[in-house]
Amino acid sequence: MTVYQAAIAALYFGAASAAFAQSAPSTDASPPPLAARTMTMPAAAAPDMQAVLDQIAALGAKPIETLTPVKARLQPSAADGAKAVMRMKKMSTAPDPTVATMDIPYGADPMQFARIYKPANAPSNGPRPVIVYYHGGGWVIADVNTYDAAPRLLSKQLNAIVVSVEYRHAPEAKFPAQHDDAFAAYRWVLQNAAAWGGDPTKIALAGESAGGNLAVATAIYARDNNLTKPVHILSVYPIANSSMSLPSRMDSANAKPLNAAMLKWFGYYYTKTTADPMDPRLNLVGADLRGLPPTTIINAQIDPLRSDGETLAVAMKAAGDKVEQRTFPGVTHEFFGMGTVVRGAYDAEMYAIGRLNTAFSK
Amino acid sequence: MNRFVLLAAPAALLFAGSAFAQVMTPAEYVMTAGASDLFERESAKLVLETTYNPEVKMFATMMLTAHAQSTAEVKAAAMKSRVPAAAPMLTPLQTEMIAELTAVNGPDRDGVYIAQQKAAHGGALSVQQAYAMDGTAPALKSAASDIVPVVQHHIALLMKM
């Protein structure tokens, strides 16, 4: 059977790889052929992290890399796994009501809107600091709803206005649509922050995964267009390095909830050309990184994107930026925001909040 | 599963002459839409048992009607397209979401309901749009096209909640 599969795969590659290196712009476009799997076992997750991974599996998660985008978008997320653990521990899964939200469009496309988080009851001495936050999901799956935990927590703990930016998704809108939307949203926040009770001179950029990339790319955009410079960047397990031979691509090739095959799957749907992955907006380590604001990069040990964050920190330091990078042990991609049930996530959240607090206190 | 993908993908490329495999079959569409409608009706009933929020009450009442209508429409289209439509069943994720809704009361249940609705309607729109664009059974494709603006209207209402 294995030989047969290999033969079919070879036929597929031979017939189609040149023509179909990038997907059609349809959410029904077939997934790319599966590459041969490495057998490397990822490091063991801490028991509280493993409990979340077990719940994601129990919710019926199928391997994303075998699905079309429309089906992938229906799969349980890591956040769904964390909520299931919370329910089993008799904790409420209701969003913290002390933070109020409103959804406001920043563009004509239905996906071009932002969810604005604001502490509902906390008093404020003057305008609040502002965090522009970009969610993850490889630019193909997930949305502001999936990534509710981190922006809500940051708003509450920092008494800040958090603007969680939705953006057009691939493959309907391919790279650089997500970057264009991220940049447009940043400009929009600069213009409107004061009206929301925010301080437009105290803006930080933050994001997770694909959104961790957008946070750094937007800081570069702000520098290049003479926009108000963000006071800090919080980049959580960003997509930042297009090399496929990074250490984490190997040691965490079979990690959950993100594996190396999914990275390839995302790229197949979000790129338009084979040159796109080397664009400095995607391959951030190859970008001009000089003159960027102080930056915090957070990584998970068991994550194929771990080396992205680690190499980005090295590249930013070499460019003269002030960067702190930490890799948290025993946790996986998507752990950030799970602080109520995963100890490593709580630690990472406290670290991020401390760093942002320092940036806003200056 | 792997074997299925490897076999199905090249066949579709070679014989369909396009990069679109028939990835969501008519039966899959009927099953997915049915499950999503069932989840909508079950969760609306649950929140209506406890809510005092007039906005939530109005929205949940609308969901009961709208998602009974879309089920009827998809069922009729499935008959026309000769696609067997089994009784809809919640997915494991939808079952968990119902359990989370049941586990809380009062304003917490309103909060969980609104959050779930925002998430669920995003997925529903993605399914209806995909089938309206690439669906292979004409009657079902037309039903999906009719349902798209309804889901979009629900999303517009949710944006204000």
Image (cartoon, coloured by chain):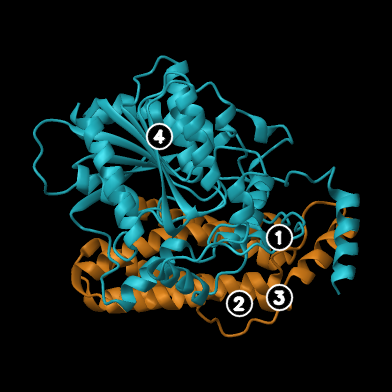
Chain colours: A cyan, B orange
The residue type indicated by label 4 comes to: Tyr
The residue type indicated by label 1 comes to: Thr
Residue at 22 percent of width and 31 percent of height: A360
Q: Are marks 4 and 3 on the same chain?
A: no
Q: Is residue A175 left or right of residue A99?
A: right
Q: Nearer the viewer, residue B89 or A347?
A: A347
Q: Dot 3: within a 10 Å radius of its alpha carbon, few (fewer than 14), some, or many (20 or more) residues?
A: few
Identify the residue position indicated by label 4 in the image: A106
Q: Position of residue A158 (x, y in %)?
A: 21, 42
The span from disc 1 to disc 3 (Cα, nearest Å) is 47 Å
Identify the residue position indicated by label 1 in the image: A38
The residue type indicated by label 2 comes to: Lys
Q: Position of residue A321 (x, y in %)?
A: 41, 24
Residue A44 in view, yes or no: yes
Q: Nearer the viewer, residue A278 or A112?
A: A278
Q: Dot 2: within a 10 Å radius of its alpha carbon, few (fewer than 14), some, or many (20 or more) residues?
A: many
* Foreground label between 1 and 4: 1
Chain that bears disc 1? A
Chain that bears disc 2? B
Q: Nearer the viewer, residue A69 or A89?
A: A89
Give the structural element (helix, strand or loop) at label 1.
Answer: loop
